[in-house]
Image: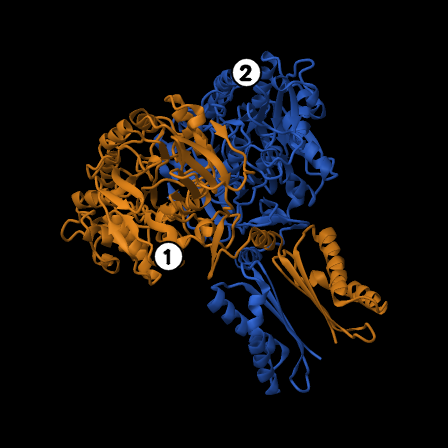
Chain colours: A blue, B orange
Amino acid sequence: MSHSHPELPAPPPLAPGALRVVPLGGLGEVGRNMAVLEHEGRLLIIDCGVLFPEDHQPGVDLILPDFDYIKDRLDDIEAIVLTHGHEDHIGGVPYLLRLRRDIPLVGSQLTLAFIEAKLKEHRITPLTLTVKEGQTEKLGVFDCEFVAVNHSIPDALAVAVTTSAGTVLHTGDFKMDQLPLDGRVTDLRAFARLGEKGVDLFMVDSTNAEVPGFVTNETEIGPVLDSVFDTCEKRIVVASFASHVHRVQQVLNAAHSHGRRVAFVGRSMVRNMGIAAELGYLDVPEGLLIDIKKIDTLRDDQVVLMCTGSQGEPMAALSRIANRDHKVSVGPGDTVILASSLIPGNENSVFRVINGLTRLGARVVHSGNAKVHVSGHASAGELLYCYNILRPKNVMPVHGEVRHLVANGALAVRTGVPPERVVLAEDGFVIDLVDGKASIVGAVPCGYVYVDGSSVGELTDAELKDRRILGEEGFISLFAVIDSGTGKVLAGPEIHARGFAEDEAVFESILPQLTAALEEAASTGSVDTHQLQQVMRRVVGRFVSNRLRRRPMIIPVVVEA
Amino acid sequence: MSHSHPELPAPPPLAPGALRVVPLGGLGEVGRNMAVLEHEGRLLIIDCGVLFPEDHQPGVDLILPDFDYIKDRLDDIEAIVLTHGHEDHIGGVPYLLRLRRDIPLVGSQLTLAFIEAKLKEHRITPLTLTVKEGQTEKLGVFDCEFVAVNHSIPDALAVAVTTSAGTVLHTGDFKMDQLPLDGRVTDLRAFARLGEKGVDLFMVDSTNAEVPGFVTNETEIGPVLDSVFDTCEKRIVVASFASHVHRVQQVLNAAHSHGRRVAFVGRSMVRNMGIAAELGYLDVPEGLLIDIKKIDTLRDDQVVLMCTGSQGEPMAALSRIANRDHKVSVGPGDTVILASSLIPGNENSVFRVINGLTRLGARVVHSGNAKVHVSGHASAGELLYCYNILRPKNVMPVHGEVRHLVANGALAVRTGVPPERVVLAEDGFVIDLVDGKASIVGAVPCGYVYVDGSSVGELTDAELKDRRILGEEGFISLFAVIDSGTGKVLAGPEIHARGFAEDEAVFESILPQLTAALEEAASTGSVDTHQLQQVMRRVVGRFVSNRLRRRPMIIPVVVEA
């Protein structure tokens, strides 16, 4: 199991008959999943998702895979296969279709319905090909077979791609719940058949590879919800992911059996559950739903509110309820259930919401105090089954941070995959499958592509650093008008500061010194505007550093008149 | 168990003979713990700690308790009792002593040694009174008895304060490890004796009240460390809290039995372990320690590095090692052990460090994959023991977020404390103990006090919001010189922007429109500088909002010449 160095050469030309795999996102982070397969000059894309920014990326809306590698080869793309309808697998599609609108999208019914609704907002009507588990499709030089997998959204698919170079099996996101709500298990019989024929490269979800054992069955959530509902006197608010159809189904079932009606709260919850119900993925008993506007016609003990915001997102319904900034209010006797995971990095936001709801008097039930959530990704125990059923010739862990990929690779080795057949790659690495052996042959540039307001891919890491400095240290703008003849200060100097603890008056004491320094520098007659600006920056910078112990961004402007 | 409303009146005068308790920090957050007890005009302070800022408080160095309530009564303070030497209990002392230098500090030997070292950096030599478990001291009108408690730092004390109003028992931070490394258990015999005599108000650590069961014994860490050390081929790096003497002791023991020498890395680790060893709290075998500068004289398998940075703090040793920005390097074959908790909110930073170390080839052992950490705070099971042994008349959960305080109160009720005798307070609430009953009688102002560069308590929440806007949206400074006679623009307009994805050139297209708008407004002759500045703000604000979809901070400056 060799861990490759990031300083890799540009890749050599692809050997005839060989297959190339280039991950453009999702290897080194949980999100923006995207892989490009290449064979005989043609490209097949698997997934195209977004990554959500962290706190050290202030102001960023979304992060995309880096399309740089394919932007000159758009016409070579046969299709984009979408394994399932989660944002981290489909959210980048609108941005890719902006580059070429008629790339066909291939996926299951629900997956395509979710991406079509999203593309509608971008005013794009895509070319689509709906596929089902068991189906095979020839996408140019890529023979694809779609395999049912179980995940935290219905209708997820793995895809086996066969070319003359061999067969690649990509799991998408999956787990192996043996008692799923819809009876649609991960198709291990298909995995076994593919394994018998020979899987040359297994690209496999790594998210939970560090977690020992097995994921609890989704069906065990239902009885827990029932028993929580039993103890609720007044309103029940349940927050979960807006795409988790099976979780919502269990909430609907519990509400139904407790004689409560359900209102969906939050734009994405309303939209997605509308789609899921229409396509038959969500079974809604007659008369169960009620419009949020009408809930005040019911008693508190007749209501369940199914809402978004389980990750503490400040603009989502649940945060606003906790801040008393929503038409829905909660108070003593009400119960709020967070039927979701706590995604690492969201702890502060989620606990702020829990504390807010607790302060309002509500009881808060969450995965920390009741079994109201199970993960959607296979744990180590399940991954071991996969490896043993498939016996893949080469393994490439995908979908995870470095620690997850390494842990997944170690599981493969423990089932007998030779360490040199485990490819630990990162975004932009180029992996060639030649004569049945996969190896890293180089790398292509693959950076973070930020969606930031109306700009896509323009924000640089240097500008993000500027933002962090602005946010942590504030800024000072300085300005003065100088008589170009005499060198006297005609107007200013003015100091404007933001983000400081101190009143602006603190800066007044430096003005005489600043004027003197400017006039002294200008009097020599041999300095230009730029140098005078540097004088201002230096005088004020030293003052701020010594007196206030801060290092703000300083923008000096000198005008000679 | 009544949850009080934040809109409380100013407190009434304290009844003669009654006791007043005012928490100035630590109730509603984990940190900046401080309580003020008042009796017959005199004040006793228990702890004075700091809180570390979160991401929505950019640039802030520390957060202090709000001293406003006591700042006019400094001479009434008898003493500050420090329960133990953690920053969230002692870190605010230097700032309080700046207000009155001769307030006596009362605490155990190690606690006082830690605060004295800290005060030395602030050039303050405090008045101190060293106490031991079992000791009683009359601090003015407050009769104090000190009781041994077990925590993740040695020499921690609870304090029982008796006045004519009754007895208050404050646990400080504690757990009930029955096999502690130093044999110094939480003194339940003393708790029982105090309970027999009658504890009128029990102020009790809530941190782990939501966690069911019992904390694993600290001594179980040692064998785990031994077995991890058994598997290490090359260097071992252990990161933990710089005050966790017992954890460090177990690392020293494991190193010693594996024939390795130990180097301390990080300023606070070196300082604290120096103090602990000198005072006899840390037992260092002869010749075990080696200076970090000399480790290259040893083979990799002869070294253990004991360092700070277990929370992913960017400037601490471990982060810098992960970023290859430290004299200590790690690589394939090396093992890094994070023998610490993952404090909520630090996940992103810690996992960034783990991923960085993994990428360098090191194996990373942490509490997620091995039992290398146990908490320092009593879980629900332990708290139940406490309540049953003490049978307190009134309970006031302290040290926690709202959710922790509420969970702790619920435990008290389950052991038979009447719900109306459980005081759920927040920072600034005023609780009077009168005739054996504790109740909330009002509140005093109690805000977050930010240490920010050289300023203490000047930074407002509005300025923090400015910083967040600056960080997320950037800023634009605009400036122009206008002829006050003709209304013509003499110089500028100039646009300077920071924190944008776009090149500054994007703003050039707006300059003609900006000039025109300024001159049109100025030509009316009836507008002042302020109004001209508003014109600039409006024109540029609209452009940025429509074109770039951003809402930066805009600072316009117009000078009339």
Where is residue B180? Give x, y as percent.
23, 36
Q: Secondary structure at mark 1?
A: helix
Chain where mark 1 sits: B
Front residue of A252/A236: it is: A236
The chain ID associated with circle 2 is: A
Q: Residue B202, labelled with which disc?
A: none
Query: What's the distance in space between the residues labelled 2 and 1, CA to CA?
Result: 67 Å
Residue under the point 81% across and 63% down: B517
Side of B69 where A109 appears, left or right: right
Say which of A183 and A263 sits in front. Answer: A263
Number of the front mark, 2 or 1:
1
Left or right, B504 with respect to B240, comes to right
Crowd around label 1: few <14 · some 14–19 · many ≥20 (10 Å): some
> What amino acid is labelled 2 in the image?
Gly
- What residue is shown with label 1? B97
Q: Residue at x 86, y 67 (%)?
A: B524
**Does B111 appear above or below B125?**
above
Asked whether residue A491 is in view, the answer is yes
Q: Position of residue A269 (x, y in %)?
A: 64, 29
Q: Quadrant of residue B8?
A: top right
Residue A390 can be seen in this image: no
The verdict on a common chain for dots 2 and 1 is: no
Tell me the residue that label 2 is attached to.
Answer: A183
Residue at 58 percent across and 84 percent down: it is A520
Q: Amino acid at mark 1?
A: Leu
Question: Residue B272 placed where, x, y %?
Answer: 27, 52
- Using the rendered view, name the quadrant where residue A39 is placed: top right
Q: Farthest residue toward the right?
A: B524
Q: Nearer the viewer, residue B362 or B131?
A: B131
Give the number of callouts.
Answer: 2
